[in-house]
Image (spheres, rainbow, N blue to C red):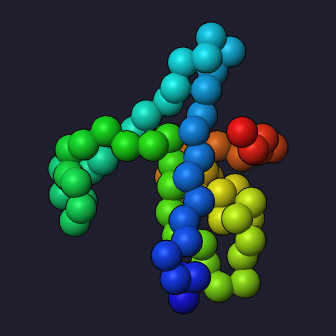
Amino acid sequence: MEKENQSAVIFVFNNENKLLLQLRSSSDNSYPSHWDFSAAGGIDEGEDHKQSAVRELKEEIGIETNLEYI
């Protein structure tokens, strides 16, 4: 179960400070075919914000890395 109204949002930048965006699936239930954050999603029960961000980043775009809060 997700923590009510809480989400983790991840912005991925390359070494040229360019932001990675993802194009939502055309079959997505919300905002199909729209550009979106690098990765984002709800915080699951028992997770903190960082754990959720790490999980969402891997689930959505396959990246495993240390995260830095900005």
Count of marks placed on residues = 0
Q: Does residue 13 show up?
A: yes
Give the percent coordinates (x, y) of residue 9.
56, 52
As drawn, the residue found furthest toward the bottom would be 1
Give the percent coordinates (x, y) of residue 63.
64, 43
Q: Residue at x 58, y 82 (%)?
A: 3
Vertical comparison of 48 with 25: above or below: below
Q: Residue at x 52, y 83 (%)?
A: 4
**Closest to the observer, 62 or 53:** 53
- Tell me if 49 is positioned left or right of 41 in this view: right
Q: Residue at x 49, y 76 (%)?
A: 5
Rendered image quadrant of residue 55: bottom right
- Tell me if 63 is positioned left or right of 29 in this view: right
Q: Quarter of the image for the N terminus: give it.
A: bottom right
Give the percent coordinates (x, y) of residue 52.
66, 65
**Closest to the observer, 8 or 25:** 8
Q: Does residue 59 show up?
A: no
Q: Quarter of the image for the C terminus: give it.
A: top right
Q: Residue at x 54, y 65 (%)?
A: 7
Vertical comparison of 35 with 30: above or below: above
Rendered image quadrant of residue 66: top right
Vertical comparison of 69 with 31: above or below: above
- Tell me if 67 is positioned left or right of 27 in this view: right
- Tell me if 33 is positioned left or right of 55 in this view: left
